[in-house]
Image (tube, grey):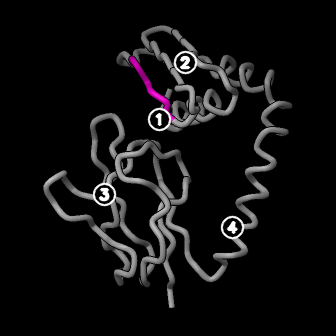
Amino acid sequence: MDLKEIQNLIKFVAKSGASEVKLETGDVKITIKTGSDEKETTIVQQMPMGGQMPQQMPVQQQQTPQPAQENAPAPAAEDKKTSDEDNSNYVTIKSPIIGTFYRKPSPDKPTFVEVGDSIKEGDVLCVIEAMKLFNEIESEVSGKIVKVLVDDASPVEFDQPLFLVDPS
């Protein structure tokens, strides 16, 4: 099971409303627990992988609750469309991974960027901690920070908007 499959499984569990899922196959043991606010997802244990996990198990799990998933995110998708229309002239910088968002390189250092700061391509905007690794998130565009969309030290999902940038 690779990282992408684990990320997809975490997203699926978070959207399904289940509070805990345990998955054991061969040498791989994963427990995913979601908090009451459904924003916090934790991988409790992952043992070293010795063999490949059968692909049928996650597929079967995803097929069962799909009708509920299709109905549930519709209002959120409409909200996103409305906010995208308001911010259509801005570029949205999104999280490339699941983890914890930090605006500072360490607690005693200043933030990477503030609202109103001019940035250029390649500038570090934040770090996202995933499994004890701190990943620097760099800007792919030049412009001006218009809005920081996530609070410091809060969990973020894959493809979640982090910053709005005015490229002009």
| Residue 125, quarter of the rendered image | bottom left
The first of marks 4 and 2 along the sequence is 2
x, y (%) of residue 84?
69, 70
x, y (%) of residue 54?
61, 17
Say left or right for 63 vs 89: right
Classify 47 as above or below 72.
above
Q: How far apart, in angstroms, are the residues tagged by discs 1 and 4?
A: 31 Å
Q: Are marks 3 and 2 in contact (CB under 8 Å)?
A: no
Q: Which residue is tagged 2?
A: 53
The first of marks 3 and 1 along the sequence is 1
The first of marks 1 and 2 along the sequence is 1
Kindly report which numbered mark, 3 or 1, lies closer to the viewer in this rendering: 3
Q: Amino acid at mark 1?
A: Leu
Binning the other alpha carbons within 10 Å of mark 3 as few (below 14), some (14 to 19) or many (20 upward) gives some
Q: Which residue is tagged 1?
A: 3
Q: Which mark is residue 83?
A: 4
| Residue 18, quarter of the rendered image | top right
x, y (%) of residue 59?
71, 24
Q: Which region of the structure is painted magenta?
A: 40-45
Q: Residue at x 18, y 51 (%)?
A: 107
Q: How far apart, in angstroms, are the residues tagged by discs 3 and 1?
A: 18 Å
Classify 40 as above or below 104.
above
Binning the other alpha carbons within 10 Å of mark 1 as few (below 14), some (14 to 19) or many (20 upward) gives few
Q: Amino acid at mark 2?
A: Met
x, y (%) of residue 123?
31, 73
Q: Residue at x 86, y 31 (%)?
A: 67
Classify 165 as above or below 104.
below
